[in-house]
Every structure is written in C-alpha cells, then in structure tokens.
Amino acid sequence: MTQIIVLPHEELCPKGALFEAAPGTSICDVLLQNDIEIEHACEKSCACTTCHVIVREGFSSLEEATELEEDMLDKAWGLEGNSRLSCQAIVGDTALVIEIPKYTINMAKEGGKK
C-alpha cells in the first residue's frame, strides 16, 4: 500500500487527510474511496479538468501524462508544472502529497441550464 497525504482544502477536506492506497488505482478513485468528493464531471474519461490536482511530492514517480491529458490540463485553473488530472494519474509505490486546487472549471455546472 502507498501513503497518500491530501493537503487541507477549504470545502472538500478542511483538515487534510492521510490514507493508504493500492498501487494501480487512480488518484481520483483513491480520493473518492476516502470520502473526498473531488469533482469528476466527465466520469473519469479525461474529457474535462474538474479532477485537476497538484502533486506536491512524488510527482516524478507517476507515469508521464498522455498527450490528451496534457491538452486537457492546458484548460485547468491554477495549472502548475506538477499538475495532473487525478483520473489519469495512477498511484505507484511512492508516497504522494496531493493538493486539490481551490477552484475548478466545470463547464457543465457553470454553463448549465438556468
């Protein structure tokens, strides 16, 4: 099992979190399994940026992002060099420290029906 630390997020995880994750699981699935309700508007199909996270520690242990993920990340709010879509980043054997950005861009929610 791999240790995951989630830094405090005002709405989703005010005190932060620490838990173990099975290697081979996406960061998004790990967060959801541990009651951190990160948005995932495209149902984890790499078609939006709502599950964007910043990997503060352990980034180099993740497999490289695909070209599709990189293209989607270009649209994310608060993009950094160590940003990933949590639905595409797969946990390995190295501990990770994850930050969930304060804001997310959800076209369905923000441009939705009135």
Image (cartoon, helix red, strand yellow):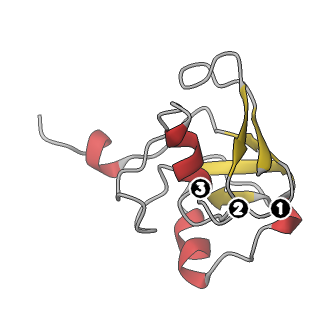
Label 2 sits on what residue type? Pro
Marks 3 and 2, the one that precedes in the sequence: 2
**At x 61% / y 32%, what residue is drawn?**
102
Secondary element at image label 3: loop
- The residue beneath circle 1 is 93
At horizontal 66% and vertical 46% (from top left) the residue drawn is 78
| Tag 1 near tag 2, CB within 8 Å | yes
Real-space Cα distance between discs 3 and 1? 16 Å
The answer to whether residue 27 is above or below residue 13 is below
Q: Quadrant of residue 69?
A: bottom right
Dot 1 amino acid type: Asp
Between 104 and 55, which is closer to the camera in this rendering?
55
Mark 3 residue type: Ser
Between marks 3 and 1 in the image, the one whose residue lies nearer the viewer: 1
- The mark lying in front, picked from 3 and 2, is 2
The circle on residue 86 is: 3
Residue lying farthest left? 114
Q: Which residue is mark 2?
A: 23
Mark 3 burial class by Cα count in 10 Å: few <14, some 14-19, many 20+: many
- Which residue is depicted at the point 35% across and 51% down? 41
Q: Earlier in the sequence, mark 1 or mark 2?
A: 2
Q: Residue at x 47, y 34 (%)?
A: 37
Mark nearer the N terminus (3 vs 1): 3
Label 1 Cα crowd, 10 Å radius (few <14 / some 14-19 / many 20+)? some
